[in-house]
Amino acid sequence: MKQHEAEELFAGGCNCAQAVLVAFGDDCKLDRETAMRLGSSLGGGMGRLREVCGAVSGMFLVAGLLYGESNTGDKAKKDAHYRLIQELAAEFKAEHGSIVCRELLNLPEGQSDQPVSEARTKEYYRRRPCKEIVGYAAMMMEKKMREKADEVR
């Protein structure tokens, strides 16, 4: 399951976005190095700014790679993709209350962190819901992939 793979990747040092994106690398025809680089800016709510959760951003990148539209003139497909992204965001928010890193971590409004990552200690994992959030985002994306496959049948 992608959920467990993403959780293990996060526990192994990937940021939230990297963990989700790398877990779906094969599905997206994306090699690990490229997935790691692509997700590297999005950890900590976009470079530790504590904005949109990295796991959510990673999920959106996977959705874009799998279902996104590259034809800028096809408004219907663009709108359908935006609808998919909003559905994913709404489902995530319904489960977790927000898609914003700072809110998910209960940090003060307007606070961003220093651009220095934290050591991944037992205490870090004990006080952070990130591993579970990463797993949930991966589970959601895997579910969406099954739904899309069923639509094609």
Image (spheres, helix red, strand yellow):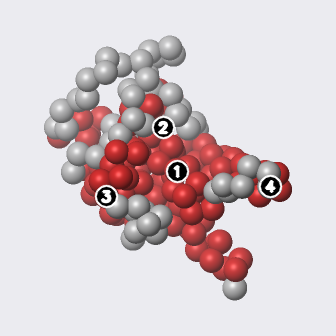
Nearer the N terminus, badge 3 or badge 1? 3
Disc 4 designates what residue?
A: 74
- Secondary structure under tag 1 reads helix
30 vs 41: above or below = below
Q: Position of residue 120 (x, y in %)?
A: 19, 38
- Which is more foreground, mark 3 or mark 4? 4
Q: Position of residue 73 (x, y in %)?
A: 79, 51
- Whole-angstrom CA distance, mark 3 to mark 1, is 14 Å
Q: Label 2: how many residues lie within 10 Å, few (<14), some (14-19) or many (20+)? A: many
Q: Residue at x 23, y 29 (%)?
A: 118
- Which is more foreground, mark 4 or mark 2? 4
Disc 2 designates what residue?
A: 53
Q: Label 3: how many residues lie within 10 Å, few (<14), some (14-19) or many (20+)? A: some
Q: Which mark is residue 8?
A: none
Q: Residue at x 66, y 55 (%)?
A: 70
Disc 3 designates what residue?
A: 32
- Whole-angstrom CA distance, mark 3 to mark 4, is 31 Å
Nearer the N terminus, badge 3 or badge 2? 3
- Secondary structure under tag 4 reads loop
90 vs 143: above or below = above
- Whole-angstrom CA distance, mark 1 to mark 2, is 12 Å
Q: Amino acid at mark 4?
A: Asp
